[in-house]
Image (tube, grey):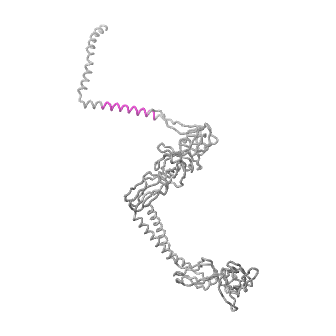
Amino acid sequence: MADVLEHTAPEAAPAAESAAPAAPQEKKSLWKKWKQMPRKKRRRIVRLFIFLLILAGGGLGVKYYLDNHTSGETQMEVITDEVRYDAITSTVEGSGLTRAKNSETITIATPGTVMEVLVSEGDVVTAGTPLFVIDSDVARSAVESARENVQGYEKQLATLQKDIAGLNLAAGYAGKLMETVTLNPGDTITKGQKVAVLADDTQLRLTQYYSYAYEGELYVGQTVDVSIPTLMSSIPGTIEAVHMVSRITPEGTKLFSADILVRNDGALSAEMAASAIVTVGEEIVYPYEPGKLEYFRTGDLTSTVNGTVISSSLVDYLQVHAGQVLVRIDGEDSETEMFTIQKNLDEARKTLEDAEKNLALCSASAAIDGTVIGLSIKPGDEVSAATAILTISDTSSIVVNATVDERNVGNVEVGMMVELDQWDTPASGFVESVSLSSTLNNGVATYPMVITVEDAESSGIQINSSINYKLTTSENDNCLVLPIQCVRTVSTEEGESLTVVYVSSPERPENAVDGILIDEAIPEGFWPVPVEIGISDNYNVEIRSGVEEGTVVFTQNQVSSSWGF
């Protein structure tokens, strides 16, 4: 065996030696074949190799995901916060548009030719400063035409009003009806028809004659005693007038007359005999003869229109008061016509007013103190109707037209101070007004708010430009606070709405509530506790009661995973 080994070993060595040089030859041959291969074929081989590598890597990734993701290694992290003392400030922010508080724009309603322009853009003017002159024949003609229309309607209305007055035939003064005519509904009545006599018996007149021996002793306003034999009494009277007539009696006595008024309390009537006795000094002066009482005045009641009787209350001896309607006459057509004329007259007066204003604007003067803005004319220009010529703005007083949304409008009050900023130019102001009328935009109601800019002249704020505002509605320098997301509004099984926080506690707190309808996953060990909240900012909310400092409360659940993608 040894012999065999010794014999064969020498032979094997040369074989190995002869085989060793063959490997480089084979490698060289493969590289040579690769180089000799067409370029397109080599590219296909490379692409196939890359594809196989990507496929293998994707498979490993899917296996890794399935091994880890399906193994239940996803974790839920509970985020909490702690009740603490801090300062909190509630603010309302937004933007608005600046404008002059007082501003007047002059617009010409009729065409014309610019004759003079007396100011320039940017000029500071005072009220009454002449601005420009425009010649407009159309404006002058409009005034003349409007004035003629007004005068025409006024005449029509005056005529018709007289007719309408006759439709309700009324007593012109208080008194007693006599010689009445019977009128029934449906009867025809004509213009000028007499329907009654109205006698004013609220007081009666008595004419008496006295001797000239008492000339100058009787005077207007003097009180006399009027004797009424029928009533067997005397009542006071007053001298209404003294007439120095010359009546000669059969005995040759010269007499003058006096008119005496007696108030009627209801017992007196015309044709009653009466005598007026006058006391002159210590002497009693008697009239020459008794007289008869007369009605203070009488007059005929007559219709002033033609028509049909609607109703009548004419009765002999009926006592009436001034203005009392006695006969009603159908006047429906007249009333409709009067309404139409009145409406036309009102419109004509408004047209005349507008025309006169426009004519006055053709030679306009500044209505307020301010700065000339937007001047658009020069001498010789032909301006058309409804052209805005210029605006005068009083920039000494600036306001901001802004809005506040429905969430914050309840916290904004008139008089609150406001911080303003326009392109890094700070200013201050105060809330002048907050409207109660809202506008709905994208489902959110906003309310108009006006802010007055303080010290506007030196503030550097530009008008007709955007500006940002910020106002502090409330603040607390030392109060319990929590992040806003810790506080929840929940409903109970009884339908009650509560504001709660979920307090961390190993046991149920005494003030925890039951029956909460939960719509989120609350971790174990957290209990719903009612709280009273106060003001809030963008991040935190004030906690007024319900929890104490240091209390740990639930904020939210945060999902986390152990695989590292």
| Screen quadrant of the N terminus | top left
Seen at 26% across and 16% down, the residue is 21
Q: Residue furthest top?
A: 3
Looking at the image, which is closer to me, 1 or 124?
Answer: 124
Instruction: Check the image and report above or below for 108 versus 252.
Output: above
Quarter of the image where one finds residue 527: top right
The spot of residue 29 in percent (x, y) is: 24, 22
Magenta segment includes 162: no
Looking at the image, which is closer to me, 328 or 515?
Answer: 328
| Screen quadrant of the C terminus | top left
Q: What residue span does the magenta drawing correspond to?
A: 47-69
Instruction: Check the image and report above or below for 251 versus 510.
Output: below
Magenta segment includes 55: yes
The spot of residue 343 in percent (x, y) is: 48, 70
Report the predominant secondary structure element of the magenta stretch: helix
Task: Answer whether residue 263 is visible to the viewer in this image.
Answer: no
Instruction: Check the image and report above or below for 239 versus 145.
Output: below
Looking at the image, which is closer to me, 246 or 165?
Answer: 246
